[in-house]
Image (cartoon, rainbow, N blue to C red):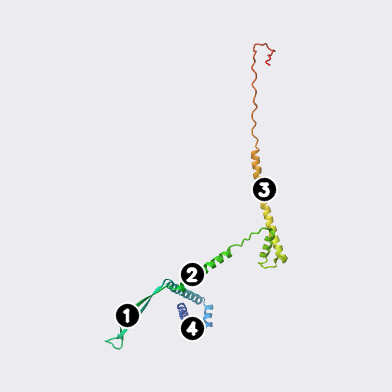
Amino acid sequence: MKYKEKTASEIIRMIEQDLCSISEICKSFKISRKTFYEWKKSKPEFKEAVEEAIDHREEVMVASARIGLKQLLEGYVQKKEKITYVPDKNDPVNDVEKCRVVEKKFCPPSIRAIKYVLDREERKKDRDQLLASERRPLVIEVQDEETKRQLMILQENGFRSGGSLNAEVVAAVDRKLEGELKVKSEELKVENGQEQTEQGQIIEQTSVAQPSAAPVEKPKPKNLYPFLPTGYTSRTD
């Protein structure tokens, strides 16, 4: 069957309203399912319209389900109308409404619906915790280097047994350990160099020479006999 815009529009409307299945829609328009999927494949606009109709249908169904679930959780009022008809006096062929009775009944919350929501929330929490634990890196502290080496071999072998018998796995782990050792030794050298530099600066600051004090000159003894002639000295001891 040849593709027609009018037929395509009617198919989209029926899909969106969720009136029939794809097979029933194809039968009503006298086309095969193969023709329907060929239209989707060859007509991008038809494919896009079908996908949008399906998405809209799903949104409406989810909204209706949420409304129904909300009513079951909170309780709701159910109305029931009872209408009585009698023959029309002026027109005996037709009936007219005599009276209308409206009954209201309150339906309490559903225990099953409440349990369903609570169970779903618990499952969601468990799933979130599992995802968080999977994202969190695994940290194992060991007391000796050999235990660390065996764990690294197990990890390198994909957490399967027999890794210590595989020469390639063991060699790869040993290379990693050698690299870690080199990095640690370089860091230790840098730290020791910084400490020696700091100690040298402290010693240099403490060993700065203090200026020496000027010598104190002793006072000369006064001449107790100023009347002696030149060339004579007096003895005071």
Earlier-in-chain disc, 3 versus 4: 4
Q: Which of marks 3 and 4 is in front?
A: 3
Residue type at the position of mark 3: Gly
At horizontal 71% and vertical 63% (from top left) the residue drawn is 170
Q: How far apart are marks 4 and 1 (CA)?
A: 40 Å
- Residue 173 in the image: state x and y as whole percent: 69, 62
Q: Nearer the viewer, mark 1 or mark 3?
A: 1
Residue indicated by mark 2? 118
Earlier-in-chain disc, 4 versus 1: 4
Q: In front here: 142 or 183?
A: 142
Q: How far apart are marks 2 and 4 (CA)?
A: 38 Å
Instruction: Quarter of the image for the C terminus: give it.
Output: top right
Earlier-in-chain disc, 1 versus 3: 1
Q: How far apart are marks 3 and 4 (CA)?
A: 84 Å
| Disc 4, SS | helix
Q: Which of marks 4 and 1 is in front?
A: 1
Residue type at the position of mark 4: Glu
Q: Give residue 193's mark.
A: 3
Q: Give residue 24's mark.
A: 4
Q: Distance between the residues labelled 3 and 2?
A: 62 Å
| Disc 1, SS | strand
Residue type at the position of mark 1: Arg
**Residue 207, placed above or below residue 107:** above
- Residue 11 in the image: state x and y as whole percent: 47, 80
Q: Distance between the residues labelled 2 and 1?
A: 42 Å
Residue indicated by mark 1? 100
Are the two marked residues, 4 and 1, in contact with CB atoms closer than 8 angstroms? no
Residue type at the position of mark 2: Leu
Q: Give residue 58's mark.
A: none
- Residue 128 in the image: state x and y as whole percent: 54, 66
The 10 Å Cα crowd at callout 1, few under 14, some 14 to 19, many 20 or more, is few
